[in-house]
Image (spheres, rainbow, N blue to C red):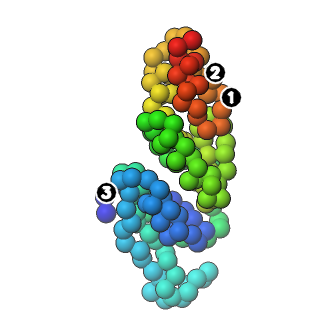
């Protein structure tokens, strides 16, 4: 277990979420699953308490803490993609598995975790500054899932 780990609070689906993330993103894997050694308020002996996993190279722990806290956009995973095919694959996996689309490359998975599916061409356009960045930014504002061809066209003017 790394010294610094992101802890994600789930109602009761930490293992299902971790399995989905590790099956969806490269450089991901499951780790230890810790189960309750006895009955406890809100759960029974053997229920999953925590799940260790790595998603896209980032160490995480999923905690089944109950319905007290909900996820929001103040935390998100940002996944950098190389092309439209990779962008579509991740977007469709998240949205098509009970998630929902948002704006400007953001979507939310079925557990409420926010994801930014961000093609490198967009990041590069914004880093270029000037009119190129402005055009790419304005194009992005009209999108849900990022359209790589439209960002490339906006960069060129």
**Mark 3–mark 1 distance (CA, rounded to whole Å):** 40 Å
Query: Which label sits in the foreground, 3 or 2?
Result: 2
Q: Using the image, tell me which numbered label, if any, was put on residue 142.
A: 1
Q: Which residue is mark 3?
A: 3
Q: What x and y, as percent, mark residue 39?
A: 54, 88
Q: Quadrant of residue 124?
A: top left
Relative to 18, does residue 155 appear above or below in the rendering? Answer: above
* Residue drawn at (57%, 65%) of the image: 10
Q: What x and y, as percent, mark residue 94?
A: 58, 53
How many badges with numbers are in the image? 3
Relative to 29, does residue 92 appear above or below in the rendering? Answer: above
Q: Which residue is mark 2?
A: 138
* Residue drawn at (35%, 53%) of the image: 27
Query: Which label sits in the foreground, 3 or 1?
Result: 1
Relative to 93, does residue 85 appear above or below in the rendering? Answer: above
Disc on the earlier residue, 3 or 2: 3
**Mark 2–mark 1 distance (CA, rounded to whole Å):** 7 Å
* Local SS, label 1: loop
* Residue drawn at (52%, 48%) of the image: 90
Q: Determine whether label 2 and label 1 are within 8 Å by CB.
A: yes
* Residue drawn at (49%, 77%) of the image: 48
Q: Determine whether label 3 and label 2 are within 8 Å by CB.
A: no
Relative to 74, does residue 153 appear above or below in the rendering? Answer: above
Q: Quadrant of the N terminus?
A: bottom left
Q: What x and y, as percent, mark residue 50?
A: 46, 71
Q: What x and y, as percent, mark residue 8?
A: 51, 59
């Amino acid at each position: 277990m790394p010294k610094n780990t992101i802890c994600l609070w789930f109602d009761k689906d930490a293992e299902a979420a971790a399995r989905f993330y590790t099956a969806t993103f490269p450089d991901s894997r499951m780790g230890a699953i810790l189960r309750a050694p006895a009955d406890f308020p809100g759960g029974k002996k053997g229920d999953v308490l925590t799940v260790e996993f790595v998603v896209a190279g980032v160490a995480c722990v999923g905690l089944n803490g109950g319905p007290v806290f909900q996820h929001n956009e103040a935390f998100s995973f940002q996944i950098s993609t190389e092309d439209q095919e990779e962008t579509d694959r991740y977007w469709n996996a998240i949205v098509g598995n009970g998630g929902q689309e948002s704006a400007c490359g953001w979507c939310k998975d079925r557990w409420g975790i926010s994801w930014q599916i961000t093609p490198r061409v967009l990041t590069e356009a914004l880093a270029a500054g000037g009119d190129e960045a402005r055009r790419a930014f304005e194009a992005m504002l009209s999108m849900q899932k990022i359209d790589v061809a439209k960002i490339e066209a906006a960069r060129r003017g």
